[in-house]
């Protein structure tokens, strides 16, 4: 239960890193002005990431938790390549694209 909830919380937190860094990279590379200041982005990050991550950590148990076999601590890791690729490459890119769409349109 705790392991699954921590994985959800980590995936949520990691997915917001790409949309936060890409505006700065675009600003440096393409000289497009920033929509928000650095301090404002940090404040928004604290306000929008803190409470949902805590809520995911305290989420209720899954309905089929007793049907799952016990976790093998030698092979099951909290942060895996699949979790990182899902958070950064899929969700993070979609969020960054949505942010740029909202900025330009």
Image (tube, rainbow, N blue to C red):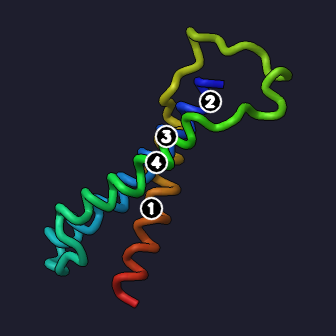
Indicate whether 92 appears above or below 28. Answer: above
**What residue is shown at x 17% (from left), y 61% (from top)?**
39
Instruction: Provide the residue designation for mark 2.
Output: 4
Q: CA distance from mark 4 to mark 2?
A: 18 Å
Q: Quadrant of the C terminus?
A: bottom left
- Disc 3 and disc 1 in contact, CB within 8 angstroms: no
Q: Quadrant of the N terminus?
A: top right
Q: CA distance from mark 3 to mark 2?
A: 13 Å
Percent across and percent down for residue 5 are: 59, 33
Q: CA distance from mark 4 to mark 1?
A: 22 Å
How packed is label 2: few (under 14 Cα within 10 Å), some, or many (20 or more)? some
Disc 1 secondary structure class: helix
Q: Image check: 73 left or right of 66?
A: left
Disc 4 secondary structure class: helix
- Disc 3 and disc 4 in contact, CB within 8 angstroms: yes
Instruction: Provide the residue designation for mark 3.
Output: 54
User: Considering only order in the chain, which callout, 1 or 3, is on the residue closer to the N terminus?
Assistant: 3
User: Considering only order in the chain, which callout, 1 or 4, is on the residue closer to the N terminus?
Assistant: 4
Instruction: Provide the residue designation for mark 1.
Output: 93
How packed is label 4: few (under 14 Cα within 10 Å), some, or many (20 or more)? few
Residue 3: which quarter of the image?
top right
Disc 2 secondary structure class: helix
Instruction: Provide the residue designation for mark 4.
Output: 51
Q: Total of numbered circles in the picture?
A: 4
**What residue is shown at x 50% (from left), y 42% (from top)?**
11
């Amino acid at each position: 239960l705790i392991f699954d909830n921590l994985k959800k919380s980590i995936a949520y937190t990691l997915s917001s890193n790409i949309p936060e860094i890409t505006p700065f990279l675009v600003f440096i590379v393409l000289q497009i002005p920033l929509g928000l200041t650095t301090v404002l982005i940090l404040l928004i990050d604290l306000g929008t990431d803190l409470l949902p991550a805590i809520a995911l950590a305290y989420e209720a148990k899954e309905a089929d938790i007793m049907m799952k076999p016990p976790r093998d601590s030698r092979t099951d890791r909290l942060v895996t390549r699949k979790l990182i690729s899902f958070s950064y490459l899929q969700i993070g890119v979609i969020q960054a694209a949505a942010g740029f769409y909202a900025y330009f349109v």
